[in-house]
Structures are given as structure tokens and as C-alpha cells.
Amino acid sequence: MRYRYQALDKKGDLINGELDATDKAEVLSYLETQGYTPLIIKKSKQIFSSFSFSLFKKKVPSRDIIIFTQSFSSLIKAGISIDKALNIAKEVLESSPLRPIIEAVSEDIKSGNSLANALSRHKNVFSDLYISMVKAGETGGILDTVLDGLSLYLEKSHEFKNNLISSLIYPCLLFVVSILSIFMLVIFVVPKFMNMFETMNVSPPLPILLTAFIGNFFKKFWLIFLILIIITIYLFKYYTKKPKGKLWIEEKSLTLPFIGQIILKVENARFARTLGILLKNGVPILNSIMITKEIIINQILKKEIELIYIGIREGDKLATLLSRHKKYWHAALLSLASIGEETGTLPEMLSKCADILERDVEENLKKIVSLAEPMTIIIMGLIVGSLIISMLTAIFSINETVF
């Protein structure tokens, strides 16, 4: 949500501005951190509704953020000031939608804001993890090191996400093509055979009769089916948007054979990677855990992380807390977290664990793809083959009747 505000700075001058925030309280908090006295805070008026606006709004690709972070990190390492580094790094982006955002960040820094505060005005682009790490780097005087680690983290996360998507594209495409092929056969091919049988007064075989019945049924009632599908999708989305429905779906997804294990490994890898990079760059463990919680998608694991936060605040070790709910946390994470805490290398062990789990997920997905292809072909072959055999049998029976 975008808010407009009017405020007075420390000199008493009037300031007008806009800020992306979840609510007015967040805008107020931002103004207070800048030392401004808020006068008016209100939602920005938009010509389009939020739904239509989101359709036409250009989303910043994650690849652009990675390229910017890598360039910016190299410039800061070379000893260039933050505002100059931002101006140089934005040139790499060319026509990217990220470019005007970097220009706005640069203007905020020239006005006296810190880099973290300037980035926090664009939370729809820069994640809490990104902003928190930059803040830790500025506070500790190690911004160049933090940006280097952040660019590596973003690169690995982007690569893992792309591998995940590319692994699922082919089986999904194959499944869709198979369904469409069967649909075309049932709707257009089988009825022609039925007409031929009727013309010759020959009784068609049972498989052809059943297929023709299904095809005619869909032809007559396709609109009702379409409406039912739309209503079902709408009700499903409505239910899953509610906390109770979302929790139920995510709880059930973890119990699915094979798929549930992959979801857990993905979330465990994300947890280990994020927590490791935050701890490595000097963010306190309690803050790191709360930031990591926002990166996790599954609500069940979010609740588990809240319990971990409470436990660490009371003095327990991370490995001990993870071992209390072994069904949600991978054995590799438990053992490497324990070794890391004992040897004082927890960030490194967490990063290593993330590497192990991500490789494991990629291997599992390759297995799914290798199995999905022959299984889909076999199922489609059986359905189509049985129909073709039925048709050929019927044709032969016609020939016998004629002769």
C-alpha cells in the first residue's frame, strides 16, 4: 500500500513524500526514525483499483536485483561512496523497472538518510532480509562484506528457484498435452465413428459407447462444468486466504507422500540459508530468527520458528530446539546445527546444510521428472490405445457384416 505524508523536519521545514508500507503505523514509525514530526498521513489515490493496477505495474525481476547488488558490492569494495556507487550501479540496469527505484534511494541518501532506511521505503522490491543485512553492514562498518555475502545468497536462491521451476515444466506440459489429446479424441473423433455405426445399423462396442456418452455429455453441459470449475476455484482461493484454510492446506501438503518431504526440504534449506547468512554478517540471533521466519512460506514451520525464538530467548540451543520437532526438521540440519554450535561455526554449518538440502531436492525432482514422463506416456497410451483397438474391432465387425 502506498501512503502520502506531510511532516516537519528538525529545522521546521515542510516535507511532502510517499512511502510503500503495510499500514499507517509503519509510515509513522519511519517518520519518527528520521526525526520528522508527522502532520498528515493518508493513502495515495490511484486511478485504477489495486487489482487492475497490479496487472499493469511492472514487477522488478529478481535477476535485476542480483545484478544491481553484485555491481554495487564491487563499487563499495573499491572504496567509492554509497551515493556515487548507486549512480554508477543503476547504469548497468538500463531500462529495468529497478532503475527509478535506485534513483529514489540515491536521492534519499543525499537527503541524509542511511542506505537501510532508504531501501526500507521500497519493501515491495527489497525484502526484510535484504534491508536487515544492509542495516547490519552499516552499523558494523562492514557493508562491503555484507553486500558480497548478500549477492552470493541471492544468486544461489535464484539458481535454486530456477532449477525447481525448470524441473517441473516438462512433466506439467506433458500432462496438459496428454489431457488435450484425449479431449480432442473424445469430442471430435469418436462421434464420427458413432455416425458411421448408425448409418450401417451396426451396434458399436461398449468402450466406444461409453466414450461417446462422455463426449456428448460434455458437449451439452460444458457451460455448467465451466461455471462449476470457476466456482470451485473461487471457493478454494477464498478458503485458503483465510488463516484457518491456509493452515489446513499447508498442514495437509506436508503429509503428501514424497511431495511433503520435498516441501520440507525446500523450507529447511531456505531456513538454513537465510539464518546462516544473517548470522555470518553480524545480525543478532534473535533478530535473525524473526527475519528468517518471514522468508518461510509454510505456516506450520512459521509457528515452529516462533517456538525456536522463544526457546533461544530463554537460553536453549538451536539444535536442542530443532530436535524437539524432528518431523519438521531434516536430520542434516539437526546434526550440522549441533556441530556448528559446539565448534562456533554455526553460520558456516547452516550454509553447508542448505547446499546439501538443495542438491537433494534437485536430485529428487530429477527422479520425479524421469518417472513422470514414462508414466504419463503409458497412461495416455493405454487410454488412446484402448479406444483405437475398440474402433478397429468395430470396423472389422462391420466388414464381416457386409460380407
Image (spheres, rainbow, N blue to C red):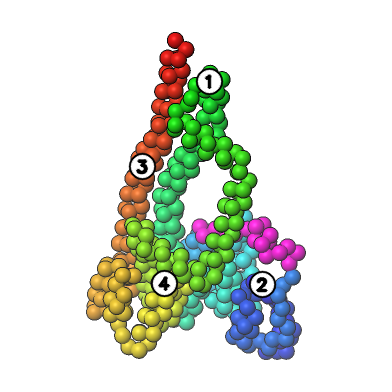
Q: For mark 1, give the secondary structure.
A: loop
Q: Bin the neighbour count of mark 3 within 10 Å (Cα to Cα): few under 14, some 14-19, many 20 and up.
A: few
Q: In this view, does 289 lie to the left or right of 61?
A: left
Mark 3 or mark 1, earlier in chain: 1
Mark 4 or mark 1, earlier in chain: 1
Disc ID at residue 201: 1
Mark 3 or mark 4, earlier in chain: 4
Spatial separation of the CA atoms under disc 3 and disc 4 = 32 Å
> In this orientation, which residue lies closer to the viewer: 8 or 211?
211
Disc ID at residue 375: 3
Q: What stretch is highlighted in magenta?
A: 46-63
Q: Is residue 387 visible?
A: yes
Q: In this view, does 213 lie to the left or right of 365?
A: right
Task: Say which residue appears at 40% left-offset and 49% top-offset.
Answer: 167
* Residue 37 location (% of width, % of height): 68, 88
Please state which amino acid type lies under the numbered disc 1: Asn
> In this orientation, which residue lies closer to the viewer: 288 or 11?
288
Mark 3 or mark 2, earlier in chain: 2
The residue wearing badge 2 is 2
**Pointer 3 with pointer 2, Cβ within 8 A:** no
Spatial separation of the CA atoms under disc 3 and disc 1 = 39 Å
* Residue 176 location (% of width, % of height): 48, 43
Mark 1 vs mark 2, foreground winner is 1
* Residue 351 location (% of width, % of height): 33, 68
Is residue 57 one of those drawn in magenta?
yes
| Residue 106 in the image: above or below residue 232 | below
Q: For mark 2, give the secondary structure.
A: strand
| Total marks placed | 4
